[in-house]
Amino acid sequence: MSDEKPAREFIGEDARIDALEERLRAAREREDERNRPTVKGASESEKLGSRVLSYLLGGILGGAVVGWTIDWFAGTSPWGLLVMLFLGIVVGFRSIIRISSPPSDK
């Protein structure tokens, strides 16, 4: 072993370093709290958009399935499909208009 002194001597605990570490820890906690995600669920506009999409797709697909079934049993291809598809579109748009218009006071 060498009897030489190290270039830097060990400095004991410093109150300033302890205070700095405490402030850094508090700042990290505040930053973590501020950046925590706040997911609360779907908003009203997202729910309305999902309802509109389901009414539109339900009307079109429902009309197509019923029309195809009518054509299958009655042998009227493609007229049953076309008529029921058109009615499904009308029903889908009617439902969309109904939920988007304000309620009427009667």
Image: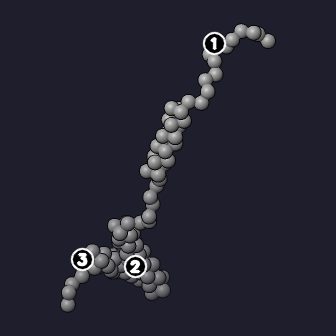
**Mark 3 highlights which residue?**
101
Give the amino acid type for the residue marked by disc 2 in the picture: Gly
Mark 2 packing: few (<14 Cα in 10 Å), some, or many (20+)? many
Q: Where in the figure is residue 23, as x and y percent of width and height?
A: 48, 40
C-alpha separation, residue under disc 2 versus residue under disc 3: 24 Å
**Mark 2 highlights which residue?**
63
Query: Quadrant of the image for the C terminus?
Result: bottom left
Mark 1 packing: few (<14 Cα in 10 Å), some, or many (20+)? few
The correct choice, above or below, for 54 with respect to 12 in the image is below
- The residue lying furthest to the right in this view is 1
Query: Quadrant of the image for the N terminus?
Result: top right
Q: Callout 3: helix, strand or loop? A: loop
Q: Nearer the viewer, residue 77 or 35?
A: 35
The correct choice, above or below, for 52 with respect to 10 in the image is below
Give the amino acid type for the residue marked by disc 1 in the picture: Ala
The correct choice, above or below, for 36 with respect to 48 in the image is above
Give the amino acid type for the residue marked by disc 3 in the picture: Ser
Residue drawn at x 41%, y 81% as measured from the top left? 67
**Mark 1 highlights which residue?**
7
Q: Callout 1: helix, strand or loop? A: loop
Choose the circle earlier in sequence order: 2 or 1.
Answer: 1
Q: Callout 2: helix, strand or loop? A: helix
Mark 3 packing: few (<14 Cα in 10 Å), some, or many (20+)? few
Residue drawn at x 62%, y 16% as measured from the top left? 8
Q: Which of the two marks, 2 or 3, is nearer to us in this view? A: 3
Residue 85 visible within the image: no
Q: Where in the figure is residue 75, as x and y percent of width and height?
A: 45, 84
